[in-house]
Amino acid sequence: MTRRRVIVAAIVLCALLPGCLKPEPSRETGNEPLTSPRSCRAVYGFTVSYGEQWLAYYGTGKAIHLESLPGREPLGSLTYRNLEVRCAVFHPVESSLLACYVDGNVVQWSHADGAWQLRLLGRLKDELTCCAVSSAGDRFAVGNYAGDVAVWSLGPEPRLVKSLQHGRPVWDVQFSPDGSELAAGGTMGTLTLWNTETWSATDVTTGHRGVVSAVAHSADGRVLVTAGYDGIVKATDRRSGRRMWTTRLSKHGIRTVAFSPDGRALAVGTIFSGELQMLNGSTGRLLGGFPTHLATVTQVRFLTDGTLLTSSHDGTVMSFRSSLEPAWD
């Protein structure tokens, strides 16, 4: 199926589903979602800067590609020793970008006076898989395939402050919104939660079979969601520790999840099928789903204005406008 047919099918299905996503007008036709040029054969993920003025995505092209938001105009690219980027995240309060490379190097790109300057933070062993920065911007965590999670203290002189053991290959790391907790999901259904003051660890029985591929917190920190290659999404109330809901969603498995800013919706990206599923964030009820990409959806994220960004192994990053009407409730 051609890309145009997939997009048209998505738009038609979206029109039939309440509260679904609406494609942004294209710069060319006015009928398609905004889509990045194919700078990568596959996009591993993306990150959005503080203030949401920049989008950076990375993949097989051995560079971090920069675009403006919301217009999606190309702004150039960042390369380091012609190495492939494994994961990257913008600093939440500064004009800097933290990136992990295939050789284990961890780098901070800082933007000042119209130029990007590079600083090497360190080098880790084994294959790096994921990274996250706290909302205050004071800590940066990196997970690897060996089951390690390294934590940096950020500031004028960044330094490695903690090496944590998850015990299984780590697929996703996320700080809670208040920075008090660091969550790491991995293989064999494992999830570890660390208190970021004492660094005491709690191993959580998730009930997932296989890889816990995605972890997400609601903006208020009350809800913790896990998703996995078993195609299941689970939500837990962090105050009571009780399971709120469980939704079996995809036979293909799940790679990525993200809450809307108000927590009413949860976007879920699937493996292989390229489908985007939308759930009610409070109940887990399926609100609708449609194909957005031609391959695995590698990352999803809501912006504050309701735009939903998605990336994929098909080499594209797409922007959709979300319509969060009362139908979400």
Image (cartoon, rainbow, N blue to C red):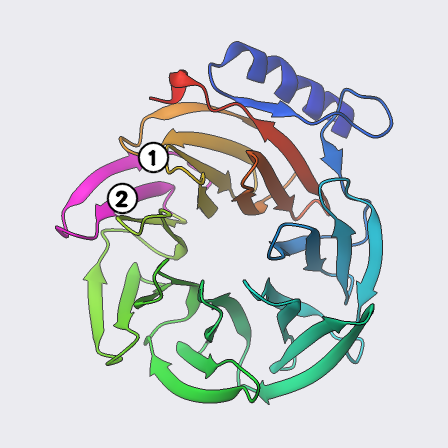
Residue 175 image-quadrant placement: bottom left
Magenta region: 230-252
Q: Horizontally, is 170 left or right of 225 in the view?
A: right
Q: Residue 119's x, y, as percent? A: 68, 84
Residue 308 located within the stretch drawn in magenta: no
User: Which of 230/291 is in front?
Assistant: 291
Whether residue 70 is situated above or below residue 255 in the rendered picture: above
Q: Quadrant of residue 272?
A: top right
SS under mark 2? strand
- Residue that mark 2 sits on: 235
Calculate the distance from the C-alpha at mark 1 to the C-alpha at mark 2.
Answer: 9 Å
Rendered position, 236 above or below 320: below
Q: Residue 301 location in percent, x, y?
A: 54, 45
Is residue 218 shown left or right of residue 325?
A: left
Q: Are marks 1 and 2 in contact (CB under 8 Å)?
A: yes
Residue drawn at 30 percent across, 75 percent down: 196
State whether residue 293 appears in this view: no
Residue located beneath label 1 in the image: 281
- 231 inside magenta stretch: yes
Tell me the quadrant of the picture where the C terminus can be found.
top left
